Amino acid sequence: MSNNNLQPTNGRQPILEIQELTMQFGGLRAVNNFDLVLHENDLQGLIGPNGAGKTTVFNMITGVYTPTAGRIIFQGQDITGLEPFEINHMGIARTFQNIRLFPNLTVLDNVRIAYHAHAGYSMNDGILRNARFNQKERELTEKTQDFLAIFNLQDRQGTIAKNLPYGEQRRLEIARALAADPKLLLLDEPAAGMNPAEIVSLMDLIHFIRDRFKLTILLIEHQMRVVMGICERITVMDFGQVIARGTPQEIQSDPKVIEAYLGPGAAALSEKFRRKRALS
Amino acid sequence: MFKKISREHVIFFGGALVVFLLIQLGISLGIVINDFWSTILRIGAVMAIVSLGLNLIYGFNGQFSLGQWGFYALGAYTAADITYRWYNDQSALGLTIVFLGVIMVGVAILYLRTVLSRIRGLDALSAFTVYFAATLILGIVAFYAGRALDAPVSSILITLPDAVSMQIVFILAVLVAALFAAEVSFLFGLPVLMLGSDYFGIATLGFTIIVKVLLDNSDTMLGFEEMKGARGMIGIPKITSWFWVFLALILVVVIMRNLLHSSYGRAIIAVREDEIAAKAMGVDVAEYKILTFVIGSLFAGLAGGLYAHINGFLHPNTFNFIKSFDPMIIIVLGGLGSMTGTLAASFTWAILLEGVLRLVLPQGFELWRYVVYPLILLLIMLLRPKGIFGDYEMPYLRQLLPPLRKKEPEPVEQAQSKLSEAAQ
C-alpha cells in the first residue's frame, strides 16, 4: 500500500481495503492498481475527470464487474468476485449515477424490496397466507413506514416512484439503499442534476444519515461544492490511476489535480493567477 | 385494513361461486349452454391458466418467453398418456413411472439446490450438468421401479368403482403432468435464462418447435405408439368437467395473487423493473428468474393436462409455434401485469374467436375469423397500447396500501405540552 494513503484513524478499524485493483476491458485498462482504505465512519470522496474510472471502481466493489486483478476486502472478508446480491447482503449498498428506482412501483414497495432478504417467511408461507406471513409482513411494512418517515417520505408511500419529483427520487434511492442496514454506502454522483437549494439539503442529508446509521460513505461527485464541503478525505483518479490523495485543502492546491482537470500547464497558470490576486 | 381485505375475499369468492353455479346449472340442465358452449367455456378457463402462467413470466418478471406453449403440450401429452393407459388397458404403468420420476427428480433438484448454492462461483452450465445427470439417473430408476409397481397399483385401483379410479388417475395425471412440465422448464431454463430477454425469447421459441417435432414423431422417435405421431392421439377419456377446470383456475389465481403480494412477488417484479437495481438491492436475480419460469410452466403443464381431457383428442398441430402466440396475444391484449386483464381476455378470446365468430360467419367462411381477429387486435393495440385493462386489477387482486402510521409527537411538541402542563 502506498504511503500517501496513511491517515489519522484514531484507532478505528478499516472497513474496506482495496488492494491493487485492476480492470481491463479488452485493450483498455480502465482502472490500474487502485488502492484505497476506508475506516469506520469515514466520509471519503472519489473524484476525477470523466472517464477516469470512478464508476468502474464502484462497479467492482459492488460485484457488477469482476476485477482483472487485485483484491477487495470488506470487514476482513475477501469479497472479490462475489455476486452483487451477495455483496449487498454483506452490508454494502449503493446508489446509481442515473437514478435507478423501480419506476412503476410505489415508494413503499421500492423500500420493501430492499428488505426482501430479511422478510423472515418462506415462499410457501406467502402462498398459504398463514399467521407467520401475516405477522412478518406487518412487521416489515411497519418498519418500512417508520423508515420512510425518517426521510420524510411517509406521506408518499402510495406514490408511483417515477412520478416523484427529482429531489425526492434521489432521497428515495438513498433511503432504499439504507433500508437493508448496510455498513458501507457508495453514492455515485448524488448531486447530479440538482439545483443549489437541493444540493444544500442533500449535503445535510448525507451528514445526517452518516450519524444516524453509523455509516461509512464513499462518494463520487463532480460538484466541487459537495466534495469540498463534506468529504474528509479525497482520492483523485485520472486515466484509471490514483494521482492524489488528501484533505480537500491539499487536493485543491495539488498541481497534478489541477492539470488533470484543466490540462497541462494549467497548474502554472493558476499559481500565477493566485499570486496576482494576492498582490492586488 | 384486515376488515377490508375480508370483504374483498367475500366478494371474490362469492362471485366465483355464483359464476360457477350458474354455468354448472346451465350445463347440467342444458339451458343456454349446450355441449359446444360448455367446451368453449372450459377451453377459455384452460387458456386463462396458461396465460396467467405466461403473464407471471413476461408481465410480472419481464422475461419474453414463447416456450409456454411447449410446456402446455408437454403437460397435455403426459397427462393424456397416463389416463389413456388406464382407460384403455387398465394399466397404471404411465402413472407409476411418471409419478415416481417426477417426485424423485423434484426432491433431487431441491436437495441439489441447497448443496450447489454453497459452492461459490459455480457457473450455470456446470450446475445444469449436475442436475441433468441426476435427472437422467433418476429417470432410469423411475422407469424400472415404475414397471415393478405397475401390477400392485393397478390391482388396488381396479378394486375401486370405475368412475372413482378414473377420477383418481385423472387428478394424479394432471398434477404429475404439471410437475413434469415444471421440472423440464427448470432444466431448460437454467442455462437459457442467462441470456438476455430477446435471446431468451428465441431460445424458448426453439423449445416449442422441438416439442412440436417430437410430438409429430412421437410414435417413431419416442416410441409411444399410442400417441400416433402426426395422426393425432385418440381415445383419451373426456373427463375434464367444468368443476375441475374452474377449481384449477381459482387455485391458480389465488396462488398467483398470494405469491405476487408477498416479498417474493415484489422481488419478482423488481427484476422486471430494473435488473441492475434489483441485484444491487440484494435480490438474487437469476434465482427469481428461474423460480418464475418454473411456476409459469407449472401452470402451463396443469392447463395442458386439463385441455387433453376436454375433447379426448390431441393433435401436434394444436401445439405448433404459430399457436404459441395465442397466450402471448391474450396477455398483451388484457394488459401485461394485470391478472384481471388476462382472465377477461382469455374468456373473451375463447368465446369470441372459437364461439361467436364460428357461428356468425357464414358456412365456408369460418377461416375468416383469422382475419377478423388480427384486425381486432390491431385496433386495440392502436387505441389502447397498454392492453384493455392496463394495470388495473379487481379489488381482490389489488395490492392494498397499509394505512399510514400515526406519527409520534415531535420532541418539540412534547416539550411544549410539558410546559403547558407545568403552567396549569
Image: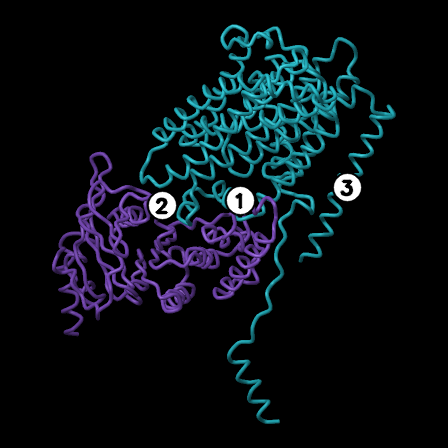
Chain colours: A purple, B cyan
Residue A82 numbered mark, or none: none
Labels 1 and 2 positioned on one and the same chain: yes
Taking B300 as reference, is A214 above or below it? below
User: For this rendering, which residue is in front, B83 or A84?
Assistant: B83
Q: Check if mark 2's residue and mark 3's residue have beta carbons within 8 Å.
A: no
Q: Residue at x 55, y 12 (%)?
A: B215
Q: Indicate the secondary structure of the residue bearing disc 3.
A: helix
Q: Residues within 10 Å of mark 1 (few under 14, many from 20)?
A: some
Labels 1 and 3 in the same subunit: no
Instruction: Locate the C terminus of chain B by quadrant.
Output: bottom right
Q: Is residue B354 left or right of residue A176?
A: right
State yes or no: discs 1 and 2 in contact (Cβ < 8 Å). no
- Coordinates of residue A204 in the picture (x, y in percent): 39, 68
Relative vertical location of residue B397 with respect to residue B406 in this rendering, above or below = above
Task: Please tell me whether residue A179 is drawn above or below residue B292 in the rendered image.
Answer: below
User: In the rendering, which numbered label is found on residue A123?
Assistant: 1
Q: Identify residue type, mark 3.
A: Gly
Quadrant of the image occupied by residue A208: bottom left
Q: Residue at x 67, y 58 (%)?
A: B1
Marks 1, 2: nearer the viewer = 1
Residue A191: image x %, image y %? 37, 58
Residue ID at (61%, 50%): A130
Disc 2 target residue: A84
According to the picture, the residue beneath numbered tag 3 turns out to be B15
Image position, residue B29 (x, y; %): 87, 26
For badge 2, the amino acid type reads Pro
Q: What residue type is labelled 1?
A: Met
